Amino acid sequence: MAKISTPDLLSGRFDQHLEYVHRLLREFGEQPHNAGRWIRRGITAPDGQRIYLEAIQHGSRMVSTRRAVREFLRARAAAAKNRAGRKEAANPD
């Protein structure tokens, strides 16, 4: 699984502080109830690889960085755009 490890997240790969995933998703206008699925199962990228929301467990809650959430949401938008393009190509009117 391509999840980020705790040492990677905390080692300076992201030079931002950690925040609760649910709070970050709300700030970006997303539904926080999707966070667990995106962290555990991810989404399928246009090239077929899995993309995961990078997060670590802190007590009973998940934390991540603003940058990690932003990058995941960009990848999710690109995957959705690719799927929409394939549907249009498969069903031309």
Image (spheres, rainbow, N blue to C red):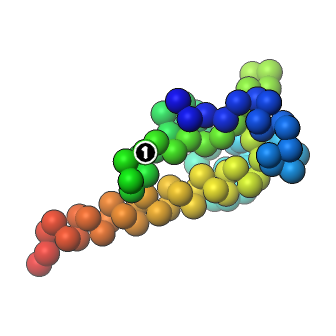
**Residue 84 in view, yes or no:** yes
Which residue is farthest bottom? 93
> Please, is residue 42 above or below residue 78 in the view?
above
> Please, is residue 93 above or below residue 19 in the view?
below
> Residue, x 30% and y 69% (percent of image)?
85
Q: How many marks?
A: 1
Q: Is residue 81 left or right of residue 58?
A: left
Q: Residues within 10 Å of mark 1 (few under 14, many from 20)?
A: few
Which residue is farthest left? 93
> Residue, x 13% and y 75% (percent of image)?
92
Camera-nearest residue between 34 and 76:
76
> Please, is residue 32 above or below residue 46 in the view?
above
Camera-nearest residue between 50 and 74:
50
Could you tell me which quadrant the C terminus lies in?
A: bottom left
- Secondary structure beneath dot 1 equals loop
Indicate the position of residue 33 as horizontal and vertical percent values: 57, 39
Camera-nearest residue between 16 and 48:
48
Give the amino acid at mark 1.
Answer: Gln
Indicate the position of residue 62 as horizontal and vertical percent values: 72, 32
Indicate the position of residue 49 as horizontal and vertical percent values: 43, 45
**Residue 26 in view, yes or no:** no
Choose top left, top right, bottom left or bottom right for residue 5.
Answer: top right
> Please, is residue 40 above or below residue 74 in the view?
above
Q: Is residue 59 left or right of residue 2?
A: right
Indicate the position of residue 69 as horizontal and vertical percent values: 67, 51
> Residue, x 76% and y 36% (percent of image)?
8
> Residue, x 46% and y 42% (percent of image)?
50
Residue under numbered circle 1: 49
